Image: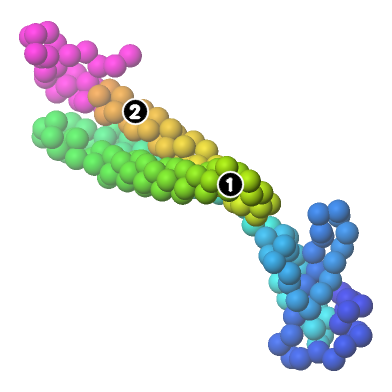
Amino acid sequence: MAMPALAQNKPADAGKKLYCWDNARGERICSDTLPPEAVNSARQEFNARSGLRSAEVQRALTAEERADAELAAAQAQVDAAAAETRRRTEQAMLSTYGSEDALRRVFNERAAIVDNNIKTAIYNVASLREALATQLSVAGDRELAGQKVSDKQAGDIRQRHTELLAQLRLQAAFEQQRKALDVEIAETLARYRVLKGIAAPADAGGAPVSPPG
């Protein structure tokens, strides 16, 4: 690749870099410094001496995209654990597990993963909600005092609100995963009892407990 024009107009240090990115208007910008507004943009980096491209950096993910990626990773982890659980329970349910307690322990790892995800999401939601409330309070005090809320303040509030909504989505998804796991555990235990010829445990009124569904 030919050296960008900027690299030809000034001496270059061996470790000096050139950056090229598209601005908000779609214009191509190249510079030997990266301004703050371009830090999160997709860009190409070039060796200033040789003009050869040394790196290509993707744009920073938005809060919603980060939440989607986090959820996808968590779901993949849970799915992998689920596949392992099914393999272990279906292939060796009768021969391996001498009691329901032994069978329940197979699910402990998955339950711990989901429960930890829920606790983390709850903590993040509480922290983001508190920070947002503080920012809104400060902005409200400024308006009541007849002062203008700065563009930066308004932008920070919008960003914090977006992050809060993303974490609420994560929390709801993790809680749904936990409910689905509870159903799977109950159904697996019901199958185990059938295979073992064990009667289902009775509820407080003495009636057998039926599996969900």
Image position of 107 (left or right of 69): left
Q: At 68% across and 51% down in the image, what residue appears?
A: 151
Q: Nearer the viewer, residue 34 or 46?
A: 34
Residue 38 placed where, x, y %? Answer: 73, 63
Q: Nearer the viewer, residue 129 or 183?
A: 129
* Vertical arrangement, residue 53 with respect to residue 211, above or below: below
Amino acid identity at mark 1: Ala
Q: Nearer the viewer, residue 103 or 88?
A: 103
Image position of 144 (left or right of 77): right
Q: Which range is magenta?
A: 188-213
Residue 34 placed where, x, y %? Answer: 73, 72
Residue 96 placed where, x, y %? Answer: 17, 38
Residue 67 at least partly seen? no
Q: At 71% across and 87% down in the image, what residue appears?
A: 15
Image position of 166 (left or right of 175): right
Q: Residues within 10 Å of mark 1 (few under 14, many from 20)?
A: few
Give the residue at mark 1. 145
Residue 205 in magenta stretch: yes
